[in-house]
């Protein structure tokens, strides 16, 4: 599909800058900080709020449900009303609801505040992706989304470690105030660095026809294949994250420090591979790099399954997990770019569906990996294998719409991509 002249004019004014990437990364970090940071404080929360363990855990579920539904709300809203207004409103509500959660006198009010916190936090996640998709396509978008992965990818590592270190001194309320503080920083960054990339004139000129076209594009092989591939590839990582405490500490017998080191190494490799994806996608094509990542993920998981079935020592599982998780650095940025590039007429809706499916699957795999108890890695291996196979198969749906160079996106982007996007530099 070619880019209409009006759309071309629309994306040439704003540019993707390092400040924009960092801001989008902060917005993406809201979920892992809001979910992982306060986990070590669950026992004290139950005691102070006179609540059961199940009630305290429900505060986590409430946030995840809110975040999933919120993506379906804010994505289409940003298509109708523009990106910047709904984004600012969502971040403001996130700050207020985060403060309400930190001050909650009862577990019921905490759960209610967490629902609103998840709903509003979704605005940053879904619209952050959409803003990038407005400004770039194809290889340029893959570069930007990979850069976003590097910035936002640190959050799942920092959050649980920081929570374990600060829980005793700050308490659960202090940890939730940190989340509120992150929201304030994000709001300031949004006001400074995020432009309106879907202006009123463009919305008014093309709303009816564009939305009809967008709905058709949401059902296209290209979008469905890339979105399902992203969500199930992400599910393999969430399965590993959910099982990592009992895997490393229970099965392998490692201490807290060793667990943190191994967890951090896997995350560091993921970020390094994401940085490599930024360079390789521009040289070799988006689809090729994505295919490498999905293949590496599947190979690592197949090795994991083989070792688990063979009853190998638990420490042997470290290597295949590292391969499976690290390979995803080639997947997340590139496949996100492919999905968003397939729906240029309804970017907010495209980002919303992608994010909702991501959160839904993340919530599903978390309990699955623990079905066999803490004495076996079989449920983890099976869950990761099924998700990886589905991701790889779904990615095959994108073949028919890929260009001869292996890249995807609008035809006009092949010749004017440099016109649409300034190079992203971490030193800018």
Image (tube, rainbow, N blue to C red):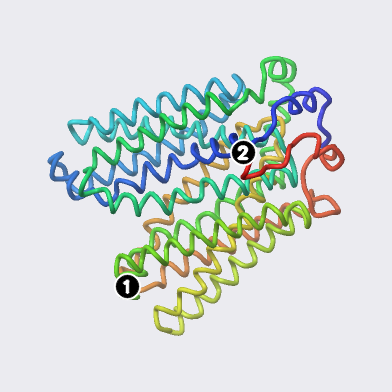
Where residue 101 sits in the image (x, y, percent)? 28, 32
* Of pointers 2 and 1, the one earlier in the residue sequence: 2
Question: Residue at (33%, 47%) from the top-left corner?
Answer: 37
Most foreground residue, 83 or 61: 83
Q: Give the Cα distance between marks 2 and 1.
A: 39 Å
Tag on residue 254?
Answer: 1
Identify the residue at the far front of this view: 427
As drawn, 43 above or below 381: above
Count neighbours of disc 2 (C-alpha within 10 A) and say few if under 14, some if 14 to 19, many if 20 or more: many
Most foreground residue, 51 or 332: 332
Tag on residue 24?
Answer: none
As drawn, 266 above or below 46: below
Question: Residue at (19%, 50%) from the top-left corner?
Answer: 43
Q: How many marks?
A: 2
Quadrant of the rendered image containing residue 353: top right
Most foreground residue, 154 or 411: 154
Under circle 1, the secondary element is: loop
The residue that label 2 is drawn on is 18
Quadrant in which the N terminus appears: top right
As drawn, 236 above or below 12: below
Quadrant of the rendered image containing residue 161: bottom left
Quadrant of the rendered image containing residue 181: top left
Where residue 80 sits in the image (x, y, percent)? 61, 21
Where residue 260 sits in the image (x, y, percent)? 37, 63
Count neighbours of disc 1 (C-alpha within 10 A) and say few if under 14, some if 14 to 19, many if 20 or more: some
350 sits to left or right of 57: right
173 sits to left or right of 95: left
399 sits to left or right of 381: right
380 sits to left or right of 403: left
Viewer-nearest of discs 2 and 1: 2
Where residue 257 sits in the image (x, y, percent)? 32, 65
């Amino acid at each position: 599909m070619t880019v209409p002249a009006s759309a071309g004019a629309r994306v040439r004014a704003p540019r993707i800058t390092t400040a924009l990437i960092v801001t989008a990364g902060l917005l993406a970090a809201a979920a892992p900080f809001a979910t992982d940071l306060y986990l070590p404080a669950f026992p004290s929360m139950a005691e102070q709020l006179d609540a059961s363990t199940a009630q305290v855990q429900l505060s986590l579920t409430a946030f995840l449900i809110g975040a999933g539904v919120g993506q379906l709300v804010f994505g289409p809203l940003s298509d109708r009303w523009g990106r910047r207004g709904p984004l600012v409103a969502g971040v403001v509500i996130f700050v207020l609801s985060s403060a309400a959660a930190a001050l909650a006198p009862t577990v019921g009010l905490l759960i209610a505040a967490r629902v609103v916190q998840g709903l509003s936090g979704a605005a940053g996640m879904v619209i952050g992706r959409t803003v990038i998709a407005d400004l770039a396509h194809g290889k340029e978008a893959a570069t930007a989304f990979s850069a976003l992965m590097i910035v936002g990818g640190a959050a799942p590592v920092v959050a649980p470690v920081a929570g374990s270190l600060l829980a005793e001194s700050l308490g659960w309320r202090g940890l939730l105030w940190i989340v509120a503080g992150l929201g304030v920083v994000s709001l300031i960054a949004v006001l400074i660095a995020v432009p309106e990339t879907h202006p009123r004139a463009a919305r008014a000129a093309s709303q009816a026809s564009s939305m009809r076209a967008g709905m058709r594009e949401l059902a296209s092989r290209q979008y469905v294949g890339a979105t399902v591939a992203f969500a199930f590839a992400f599910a393999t990582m969430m399965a590993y994250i959910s099982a990592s405490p009992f895997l490393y500490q229970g099965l392998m017998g490692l201490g807290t420090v060793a667990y943190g080191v191994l967890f951090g190494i896997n995350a560091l490799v993921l970020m390094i591979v994401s940085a490599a994806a930024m360079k390789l996608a521009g040289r070799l094509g988006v689809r090729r790099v994505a295919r490498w990542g999905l293949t590496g993920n599947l190979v690592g998981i197949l090795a994991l399954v083989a070792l688990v079935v063979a009853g190998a020592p638990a420490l042997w599982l470290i290597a295949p997990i590292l391969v499976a998780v690290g390979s995803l650095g080639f997947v997340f940025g590139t496949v996100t770019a492919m999905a968003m590039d397939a729906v240029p007429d309804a970017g907010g809706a495209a980002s919303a569906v992608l994010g909702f499916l991501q959160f839904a699957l993340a919530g599903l795999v978390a309990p699955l990996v623990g079905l066999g108890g803490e004495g076996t890695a079989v449920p983890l291996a099976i869950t990761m294998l099924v998700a990886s196979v589905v991701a790889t198969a779904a990615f095959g749906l994108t073949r028919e719409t890929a260009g001869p160079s292996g890249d995807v996106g609008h035809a006009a982007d092949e010749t004017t991509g440099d016109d649409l996007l300034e190079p992203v530099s971490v030193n800018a």
